[in-house]
Amino acid sequence: MQPSFTKEPSSFRDPSGYIFEKDGCLFRQVNQIFKEEFDFFNQSGCYQKLVDKGLLIPHKVINENLTGDSHCYTTLQPEPVPFITYPYEWSFDMLKDAALLTLRITKEAMASKMILKDATPFNIQWYRGKLIFIDTLSFEKYDASKPWIAYRQFCECFLSPLLIMHYKKITLQNLMLSYPDGIPVTVTKNLLPRRTKLSLHLYLHIHLQAKYAGRKTNTKDKPVNFSEKKMINILTSLESVIKNLKSPTTTTVWSDYYEEAAQRNQYIEEKKSIIREWINHFADIKTALDVGANDGLFSKLTAQNGIYTIAADADHTCVNALYNYCKLEKVKNIQPMTIDFSNPTPAIGFNLTERKSLFQRVQTDLVLALAFIHHLVFTKNISFIQLATLFTRLSKKYLLIEFVPKDDPKVQEMLLNKPDIYPDYLIENFENAFSATFTIVKKQSIANSGRTLYLMEKQ
């Protein structure tokens, strides 16, 4: 009888091994074909060095074939990452830091006579307040007679999106949904200003590659000298370019939202006090999703209570600021994400199973939806019933939600230049819609604001 296990759908491209789940735990199988490289990775000290420097996820070696696969050489149990995000859900600086981490790891590996054979951002995750590399099987022996196999991949997965956002001054992370394997240099070349051809670095890494893209060349019998010095020069050149790229950060409608709100009769302070009191009553809240987190004010509040919090917002500027805050302050239990909840991350890839949708990955003990739902109602025409369905999918137990009345100044701003086609936007209709799947546990008005907070429990 074969042991029961589930192979991770995204782990099929590399013959070196794969990720699988068994008895609720994740494991990585190393195949016989990768035995020599994997042994050298350990014997050279490369693995331990990267782990000691906090650059690579650590693992335990399990001396057992858990899959019954005849190709198995050994089994690893990596330290679990609590939540997986994808590059198209990251802020600009998170992608930039992931690129720099990839280059640093490549340099560290070269000091141990190894090199990265994969340079995709999917191999990096946010873990305990910093970025970390998670693919142990991405390292192979360095061969000076061969060019860096992951060079094109690095340029298309990291450099291309960063350059486009830097020069176009707009956030284009969603472009990576269309190009999950990297934005082709031929596409990038056409989106960049002509003056980028005058940069030696950009000409080399983008325009020259684009010029020769698609041409068939036979290099099998041609000797190639790709010395360590040349390789280091390429890595240093890429580092130089990426370090100088700037986020297309602008002041948005929401980037100073809480600063403005704090000036309205101590609205924020009372709101924080109510939420803190309610959360403290429930010891079973271990995880939270802050929907429309803005700059993470309330995500920080839940995180301070020891709750692992996913802080999600559609505003790239806000998420980027929160990411940089978490990095600077070494906040270990906030996961910033760029998510538009009117169009959340879909499942993509082969058979639509390679990369999971947001709903396949996220269901937390608590969902916070603070000063949020009126945005979806008045800008996307989403009904209370549809919103209740959304939060039922996202929450395991509790929903902490705020109702903002139609006469609120912020709502009136939203309705200023559009007809009021929302006669059903009433607090009693809101309560009725949510009562189908949630029980109202607590309800409290926020003084001098006209707004109401609810704590609901999933039925």
Image: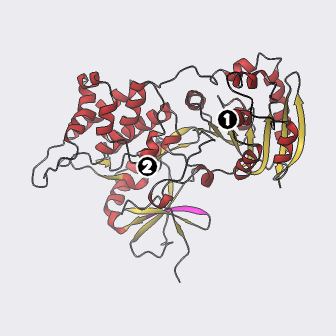
Give the quadrant of residue 228. Answer: top left
Q: Position of residue 154 (x, y in %)?
A: 34, 41
Q: Which amino acid does label 1 sit on?
A: Gly
Badge 2: few (under 14), some or many (20 or more) residues near its Cα, within 10 Å?
some
Instruction: Report helix, strand or loop for mark 1.
Output: loop
Q: In which quarter of the image is the C terminus?
A: bottom right
Residue at 82%, 19% (x, y): give it. 266
Q: Could you say which is closer to the camera, residue 224 or residue 424?
A: 424
Judging by the rendered image, the residue that carries numbered circle 1 is 292
Q: Can residue 286 be seen in this view?
A: no
* Cα distance in 3D space between marks 2 and 1: 40 Å
Q: In this view, does 202 lie to the left or right of 289?
A: left
Labels 2 and 1: the sequence-earlier one:
2
Q: Is residue 147 left or right of residue 219?
A: right
Q: Residue furthest bottom?
A: 1
Q: Can residue 453 be seen in this view?
A: yes
Does 444 lie within the magenta span?
Answer: no
Q: Where is residue 322 in the image (x, y as percent from the top left)?
A: 60, 30
Q: What residue type is labelled 2?
A: Gln
Q: Is residue 61 left or right of residue 106?
A: right
Badge 1: few (under 14), some or many (20 or more) residues near its Cα, within 10 Å?
many
Judging by the rendered image, the residue that carries numbered circle 2 is 48
Query: What segment carries the magenta color?
Result: 24-29
- From the viewer's perspective, is the residue at label 2 or at label 1 nearer? 1
Q: Which residue lies furthest to the left in this view?
A: 222
Residue at 77%, 15% (x, y): give it. 263
Q: Could you say which is closer to the camera, residue 170 or residue 161?
A: 170
Q: In this view, does 70 lie above or below 181?
A: below
Q: Could you say which is closer to the camera, residue 453 or residue 141?
A: 453
Main SS category, magenta section: strand
Instruction: Report helix, strand or loop for mark 2.
Output: helix
